[in-house]
Image (spheres, rainbow, N blue to C red):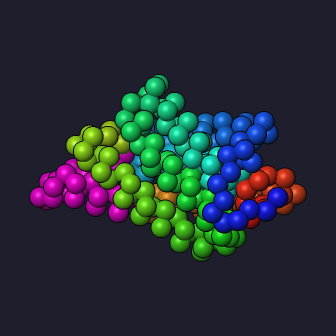
Amino acid sequence: MRHTIFEINFEKEITSSTIPLIAFGAALNIVVGQTAQLIKLPLYLDSVGTILIACLVGPVAGMITGAFANLTLGFFFNYAFIFFIPVTLVIGLYSGIVARLGAFKKWYTTLLAGVVQGLLAALTSAPIAAFMFGGVTMGGTDFLVLYFRAIGKSVVESVFLQGLAADPVDKSLSFLVVYILLSRIPRPILLRLPGYGNA
């Protein structure tokens, strides 16, 4: 079943066969993201599952994947994740749309799409981090915020500059991981899913 590029259809994307994929994507976000945070990587890597499911199923499924992962993290690890659900919605929506545009067909278009996603994520997350948490969220990129504060930048400026420094790299890497995963999935399986394979 083919889609128009900007089609948003809950009923087509949320079915008994796609719900397990959404759960898997949310779990992937949690495991990879928490591992990155545990070892204090200066990256998040907590949206690989969101991007993957947005590609395979569609933007609605991607948004639900990200939101569910952050709700789970908020309840069991750090309540701050709940406030960043708007960022996961942006990631899921954008990833699903660019997948339909063919962004994941080539590595270089994947990389470019990841950079743009990083900029969008930075714009979305900066006000939340600055005004809700004073710029510090106990993540691996907090040292960048503290650095910019130390050289005289305001909280908002520091958080935004941190986002510009880290998010494009983080999302580009996440997009490339998904590109590799998609290239390993047989075409007949992709064609059975309502997202990427039928874009």
Report if residue 144 is visible in the image. no
Quarter the C terminus occupies? bottom right
Please, which residue is most extreme toward the left here?
A: 152
In x, y percent, where is residue 73?
48, 32
Report the front residue among 82 and 28.
82
- Residue 162 drawn at (x, y percent): 31, 57
Question: In the displayed image of the protein, which residue is found farthest to the top?
Answer: 76
Report the number of discs: 0
- Vertical order, 139 against 164 (above or below): above
Q: Quadrant of the N terminus?
A: bottom right
Would you place residue 102 above or below residue 76 in this image? below
Image location (x, y in percent) of residue 5: 66, 66
Residue at x-position 43% and y-position 61%:
120
At a point 57% along the width and 47% down the height, the residue shown is 63
Q: Position of residue 29 (x, y in %)?
A: 56, 42
Which residue appears at 24% of the width and 45% of the height? Answer: 131
> Would you say residue 159 sits in the magenta stretch?
yes
Which residues fall within the magenta stretch?
A: 140-166
Q: Is residue 124 rendered to the left or right of residue 188?
A: left
**Does residue 100 appear in this view?**
yes
In the image, residue 89 lies in the stretch drawn in magenta: no
Q: Which residue is more in the foreground, 129 or 41?
A: 129
Q: Residue at x 52, y 64 (%)?
A: 114
Q: Main secondary structure of the magenta part?
A: helix
Give whichever of 34, 132 is nearer the camera.
132
On screen, residue 30 versus residue 125, left or right, reads: right
